[in-house]
Image (cartoon, rainbow, N blue to C red):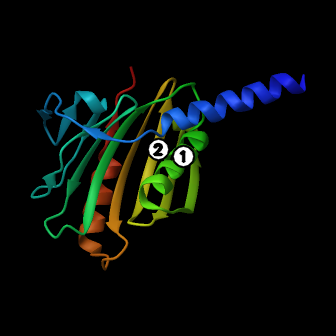
Amino acid sequence: MPQRSTYLYRLLIAGMVWLVGGCASKSAVGPTTIPGGQRIAVLAATCYPPPGWHADPLKISPKHHHQVWVSPTGSTAYGVIHFTLPLPVSADVALWGFLREMKRTEGSSELIYKQAVPSESAVRFEAQGGLYRVRGFLRVSGWEGWAAYAGTKADHSILMDELETAEQARDKTLFHPD
């Protein structure tokens, strides 16, 4: 029995390493505008970019799609990530992968706050990385998951009106599981 536990543990770790791979940008099908938001097929989500915020190029890898909208000052962002999972896992396990990827890309990550939302297989969280502080909502469904977040640059003053705008966009975001 101990061998089986070790095997499952190694399988889970290998799967999470697969989950948190890097980004590679390339073009994708554009969004479809719907009243009050944009349904973006590659994100399997309806997103609500704030008026006047510009979209960065969509980041795509075999494991995820990531769209970011940046405020006019460049200090605040609203982002949505759609990712695939190697196994159906809990939102807590997916958050662990998110934090691990943040540490890989930013040099550090610290979970500041976490609150489970069991009715939605989700978790609300706040995390501080080396470059950004994100206030997010992460949800899983079967073999896929999403994160929507409001982010601020770690080396900039927080502009509360921009952060509030990004948080409102995050909270309106709708995920569309397959």
Callouts 2 and 1 close, C-beta under 8 Å: yes
The kind of secondary structure element at disc 2 is strand
Point out residue 8 in the picture as x, y percentages from the top left corner. 73, 26
Name the residue at 55% across, 37% down.
17
Which image quarter: residue 33? top left
Q: Earlier in the sequence, mark 2 or mark 1?
A: 1
Residue type at the position of mark 2: Leu
Position above or below: 50 against 18: below
Decide which of 84, 161 is in the foreground and name it.
84
Residue 2 image offset from top left, x and y in percent: 89, 27
Crowding at mark 2 (Cα within 10 Å: few <14, some 14-19, many 20+): many
Report which residue position mark 2 lands on: 138
Name the mark nearer the viewer: 2 or 1.
1
* x and y, in percent, of residue 80 in the image: 32, 44
For badge 1, the amino acid type reads Leu
Q: Quadrant of the N terminus?
A: top right
Horizontal side of residue 29 vs 76, given as left or right: left
Residue of label 1: 95
The residue depicted at 57 percent of the width and 36 percent of the height is: 16
Furthest-bottom residue in this view: 157
The crowding category of the residue bearing disc 1, from other C-alpha atoms within 10 Å (few below 14, some 14 to 19, many at least 20), is many
Task: Report helix, strand or loop for mark 1.
Answer: helix
Residue toward you, 28 or 26: 26
